[in-house]
Amino acid sequence: MFRIAMMLMSMCVLSLYGCKDDPEVPQPAGDASATITKGEVDYSTIEVTVTPNEHTKSFSYAIGTEADLDAFKAGTLEGIINKNGKEAVTETFSELTVETEYTIFVQCVNNDDITGEVATLKIATLPLPANASLAIELTAVHLNEISAKITPDEHTVKYSYAIGTIEDLAAFEAGTLEGIQTVEDNTEATYQFPELDSATEYVVFAQGTNRADIKGEVVCSSGMTLIDIFNVEVSYDAMNLMYCTVTTTPMDAVDHYFILSAGEDVYFEFVYMYEEFFGMTEDEMIQELGMECTGETTNVFGLSGEPNFKQMMVIAMYDAAGELQGILYDKFTTPEITPGLPLPEPVSIVVSEETATSARVVFTPGANTAGYFQLVFKAADYDEVMDDPELTEEDKTAELRSFLLFANYMMIEEDDYVWPGLIPDTEYVALARPFNDNGEAGWGDFTAERFATLADASAPQARPSGRDSKIVKSLTKELLESMKR
């Protein structure tokens, strides 16, 4: 009975225990690990993505060489990066050595703080990219400017350029040369360098940069002087204070040119006046006032008449297409006065063959004469000056002189010419005044010869038609003032 009772009691106890929930048995954490994915790789950078698995509590990673594995495990490798959690991370390692094999190390810790195996991935940096290189081609010279085409190669990501002289090379390399321009791509382009000095030898500099931000060699164009391309050589064969004989020889590239003489002191005043009042550019003014030439020519040009005076020959040069290619200013100084030079004898004037609208006038210079000014104009204008009681003799001389200079019929030898375009039945004066080599200091006396046209009916004109002088006028202060009036 006792044994039966004990068995029943044991069953009841077991029954009581069997009615309760079973307790959870602890499970070990899974192994923590990560995958390493290679990203962008360059000559000095490596990009990777580290992706921990679901069992990861934290992880560490670093870059080194294969020999650094033990240092990474020990936590002594420089540059170890620690992360909590299991979020993937993308890391870029920079400032690496070119063309070198690196190892990426990753080690994860699970929730039981058990460290997993080290994952590794070997990645090599790329070799350096090729150096940037460029080509420079000087393409054109136009109106005192140079055009240069710069062609970068495929290794160039950007480039800089400038113009200077060969002495500026060091300044360009140092980045201190004034006017350096930078292009942030490798587009081929042609660049203009304006407002250059025609006598200076210029060099175009360019330097490319590759994708490693390494600058290539500086490329220099050949030296170019504008005067070597478009130029007119000027030689002075003879000169006194009133005129000079000039031979001009253009280079082959110059198809034609216009030339005039001007005082340095007033030339740009003429330029301003023609632009302001007539809307002309400088070269249009030169065409208006100067002489057109092709090939080598010899001409006589008027001067100011003053000693030691700064003059210049101004030449506008054109190519075969009629495009202005440059304006040359050839500067010179008039000679000094020659002491003791005798004054010229008066000019002889003979008038004949008068008709209603013309007359033949022969001007013959006297001894000691370098040249003379001549003019045929109405006697009424001459008398208005000579009969004015308020004018002194000096004033009258100045007025007649201004008539001659403004008309600018300067001659250096005998002139036999039929003056056309005169008004019938009108009195005229043929006026001349000679000078010697001393110019303004060597004037002779005036000669005035009166004559009258016939009364035959003919289409009248207001004044004698202009005639060609053998001497090209000079732009002087006196001419400027008379034009302003």
Image (cartoon, grey):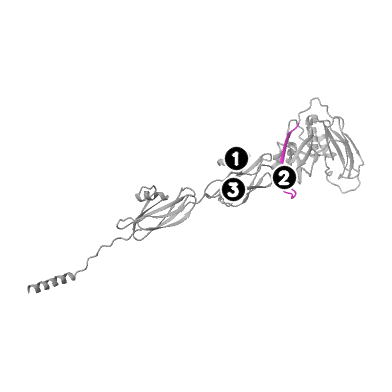
Q: 131 or 452, which lies in front?
A: 131
Q: Nearer the viewer, mark 3 or mark 2?
A: 3
Q: Amino acid at mark 3?
A: Ser
| Residue furthest out toward the left | 1
Residue that mark 2 sits on: 283
The N terminus: image quadrant: bottom left
Magenta residues span 318-334
Secondary element under disc 2, as helix, strand or loop, is helix
Where's residue 53, x and y in %? Answer: 37, 60
Secondary element under disc 3, as helix, strand or loop, is loop
Residue that mark 3 sits on: 133
Q: Which mark is residue 191?
A: none
Q: Evaluate whether residue 177 shows in this view.
A: no
Q: Please indicate whether residue 342 sits to the left or right of residue 22 in the image.
A: right
Q: Nearer the viewer, mark 3 or mark 1?
A: 3
Q: Nearer the viewer, mark 1 or mark 2?
A: 1
Secondary element under disc 1, as helix, strand or loop, is helix
Q: Amino acid at mark 2?
A: Asp
The chief SS type of the magenta part is strand
Q: Quadrant of residue 422?
A: top right
The C terminus: image quadrant: top right
Within the magenta stretch, is there residue 178? no
Q: Please indicate whether residue 322 sits to the left or right of residue 131 in the image.
A: right
Q: Which mark is residue 169?
A: 1
